[in-house]
Amino acid sequence: MSERDYYEVLGVDKSAGSAELKKAYRRLAMKYHPDRNQNNPDAEANFKEVKEAFEILSDPQKRAAYDQYGHAGVRGQGGFGGGQGGADFSDIFGDVFGDIFGGGGRRGGQRVHRGDDLQYNLEISLEEAVAGKEVKLEIPTLVHCDTCDGTGAKPGTKPTTCSTCNGMGQVRMQQGFFSVQQTCPNCRGTGQVISDPCDDCHGRGRIRQEKTLSVKVPAGVDTGDRIRLSGEGEAGERGGPAGDLYVAIRVKPHKIFERDGSDLHCAMPIDVVTAALGGELEVPTLAGKVSLKIPPGTQSEKMFRLRGKGVKSVHGGPVGDLLCRVKVETPVNLTAEQKGLLEQFAATLSGNKGEKHSPQKHSWLDGVKSFFDEMRGGSSS
C-alpha cells in the first residue's frame, strides 16, 4: 500500500469530522469499486487505499496515533486485516452503504422496521373548512398484537436466535477480495426465528383492526391541505415505531360560493328593474346576511367587493373578501300586457337620445360600422 497521506487520499482537511469522512469515503468507494471499473487495473489498488485511509481516520485512537506519528504510528492496523480495537470493515460498510443493501434499527436483539404511513381522504363542507371542526375517523390499520406483545411468538415462548446469521440479520457474501452484506434469507433480516408463532397474529407481531381517532380540523383549511398525526399509522414490525397518518382534506363544492385562497366568489342574479333603477339586496355570507346597495344603471358582470367577508386561511394572513358578480336576468314567459309595456318603453329609448341610455351598445355598433367601412375601402383599392 502506498504511503500517501490519508487525508489526501480521502480529499478532506485534517479537521474533518465523522460525517465528512463518511461522505468522502462513500463517494470514492463508489468511484473505485472494482465491479464498476473492470477495465481499470488500478481500481482495486485505489479502492484498498481509500478503505485503509477511512478505517484509520474513522477510529479516534488510530487517528490520534496517525496525526502524531504518521504511518509509523498505525503500521499494520489498516487494510482488510483490521487491527485490535479498530472498527471492523463490515461495520463501516454497513454504516456507509446501509441504504443500498437495506437496513433498519435493532431492538431487543432483533431487527425492527418502522410501520407504513397511512392516508385518509376526508371530505368536508365549505362551512366546516372555514370554521374548523372535530371529526371521528375509523381507520383500518395494522396494530400491535397484545397477545404476544408484538414478538410474534406464542405466549410462554420466545423467538430464538437465527443460526444462519447468528442474530445479525445479515449474511456476508464474498466476491474475490470484496465482501458485501445481504439480508439473511432464513430470518428475513430480523435476527430471530419464531418456531412457535402466536395464534392471533401468526408470527407477524401485528393484527389488522379498525381504530377510532378524533381529529381536530383547524379553521381555514382548503383542498390539498394535509393534517399529520404522528405515530397513528401502521404499527412497526417486531415492536418498531409506528408510521404516521396523513388526513388529506377535500372541500366539497358549494351551492353558492367558490373559494379562491382567502377570497370567496358568488354570482348574484338581479332583475332588469333593479339594475336600471337601483335598489338594495340581501346578500348571503358565511357569517349571515348583509345588505348591499345596487346603484342605478348597474351593468351585468359588475363586481361588488365585501371586505372581510371571505376566509381566514389556516396558513395565516388577513381575512379575505367576498366578491359578488352581478348577473342581470332577462325576463321570460312574458304576458301580452307585459310585452306591450316593454314595446312602449323601447319606443321611448329610440332616436338620437338612445345613445345615452345604452352607451355600450352604441359604441359597439360604431365599431362594427368602422370595421365594415375599412373592409369596403380595402376591397375597392
Image (cartoon, rainbow, N blue to C red):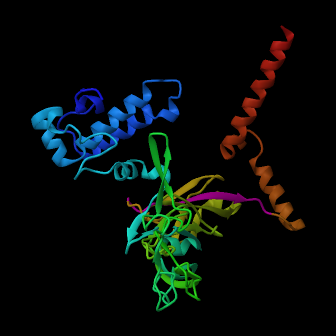
Left or right of residue 320, residue 69 in this image: left
Q: Residue 283: tell me if it is visible.
A: no
Residue 312 on image: x %, y %: 43, 65
In-front residue for pair 195/188: 195
Q: Position of residue 342 (x, y in %)?
A: 81, 58
Classify residue 310 as left or right of residue 278. left
Report the residue at 46% width, 69% height from top.
191
Q: Quadrant of residue 266?
A: bottom right
In reply to whether residue 225 is colored magenta, the answer given is: no
Q: Tell me if residue 189 can be seen.
A: yes
Outermost residue on the top side: it is 381
**Camera-side residue: 354 or 103?**
103
Q: Nearer the viewer, residue 87 or 146?
A: 87
Magenta segment, which residues?
317-331
The location of residue 183, given as percent across then percent down, is 51, 59
Residue at x 61%, y 54% (from the top left corner): 298
Give the residue at the far right of this rendering.
336
